[in-house]
Image (tube, rainbow, N blue to C red):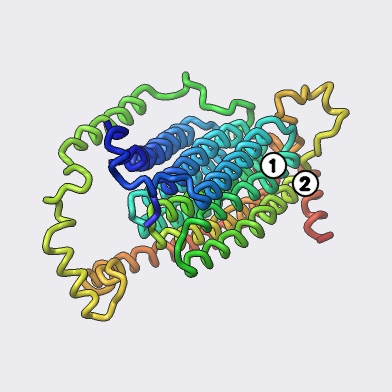
Amino acid sequence: MALAAAPAMVPAQLAWTPTAIVVAALVAASAFFSFVAVVGFYRLPDVYARAHAASKSETLGALFGLAAAGVVVGTTGELFKLVLLALLVLVTGPTAAHAIVRSAYDAGTEPWTHDDEDEAGGTDGDATVATDGGQSADHASSVDDAEVSR
Amino acid sequence: MTTLQVVAPTLEVAVSVALLSFVVVVAVLTAVVRDVLTAVVVFAAYSLGLAILWVLFHAPDVGLTEAAVGAGVTTALFLLAISQTVRPAGGRTLVDPRTVKPSSVVVALGVTVGLLLTVPALPPVGAADTPAFGPVSDFYLADAADRGVDNAVTAVLVVYRGFDTFGEIAVVFAAAVAVLAALGRETLA
Amino acid sequence: MTSPLLAGVLLAGATALVALAALVLGRVVRGPTTPDRVVAVNVVGTTAVVVIALLSAALDEPGFLEVAIVYGLLNFLLSIGLAKFTIERGGVL
């Protein structure tokens, strides 16, 4: 019913203007890279590799999404805030992922290697880890060493 | 109406539906996840979803509060509390259904159904006869500007109900002091 | 005013991102380690920032961007706090 009325109304709003095409492309790129990040989250074998998906793919997807919003917004003030947001995401995303991963390393998580593939069955993507469950005293001392050495 | 003028509101509904589903899923996960730390992390995600929902419903102030209190302060307090506990052994991710008390499920379902029953009594979204569109809000919007406060929400908080806000601050301050006292006694690692 | 077409594109993108964030929750539940979960929640937070920015542009609400900025800062603090927590509490986590 809406289609019948459409030709009489303003078609200018419907037209795929260059702006609309750019925005659609940026949104699609954002969704694509976020999807890649999600796939990485499920397929990659351990936390180090998954942090990789989070810090690279997800950040790129976020930047594309913010760029799409930046093309649409009208005023300089909004654009400035979006640029600020993009810088924030660009700096904090990988930094946070790095901090988490370093804490995982300090806590004794063993990185996944090819040798683990046979016994751990890497297809599930849940490489087991020394920190799971109750931890022993020698582990606590290794954490202290890591703190001192920094 | 062009097709897209129909489609755009539909998409807004789609975003709301996606967010609401997200929030419900996360809320259920918070309840059924066995590890307490996972529950806290999932609960932070719940707060984020809820906060986006507030923003979508044009209540950015509430969204900010939800994000700061729900995802920020609550998570920090939960983590401090958990750090005093010991992680249970065992590999189960989700709670064993046999250990759930039927009475607690009944109470949860009863409260949910009771709250849902009140929904039809609410006025429809955007109804003209709701108090928000009455003369009261016009008065506050005009009067707040006369008093030199640009943000109407701030004006209500610190001018029209200033004593109420003062009481709230007293409560929050007392809670903060209590938390600090408890943490000081526990001698945190 | 954002044209309906642009708003539709942006809202569709926001819906897709919310759906992807819901998928990331699977990793939050499965873990298997706490850092896995923290990284996943960090990604959910980043997605939240982008979704709010898209909503701001689509619904023509510049005020939403402030919320997005606060989110971004909070998300970073949350992740760093959780990361530090896992180091200090190696025994529990």
Q: Residue at x 16, y 47 (%)?
A: B127
Which residue does the numbered mark 2 point to in the structure image? A105
Q: Residues within 10 Å of mark 1 (few under 14, many from 20)?
A: many
Q: Residue at x 47, y 45 (%)?
A: A16
Which residue does the numbered mark 1 point to in the structure image? A53
The chain letter for the residue carrying disc 1 is A
- Marker disc for residue A149: none
Position above or below: B18 against A30: above
Badge 1 amino acid: Ala
- In the picture, the quarter occupied by the C terminus of chain B is bottom right
Q: Is residue B58 left or right of residue A34?
A: left
Sooner in the amino-acid sequence: mark 2 or mark 1: 1
Q: Residue at x 57, y 63 (%)?
A: A83
Which of the pair A29/A123 is nearer the observer? A29
The chain letter for the residue carrying disc 2 is A
x, y percent for residue B185:
54, 60
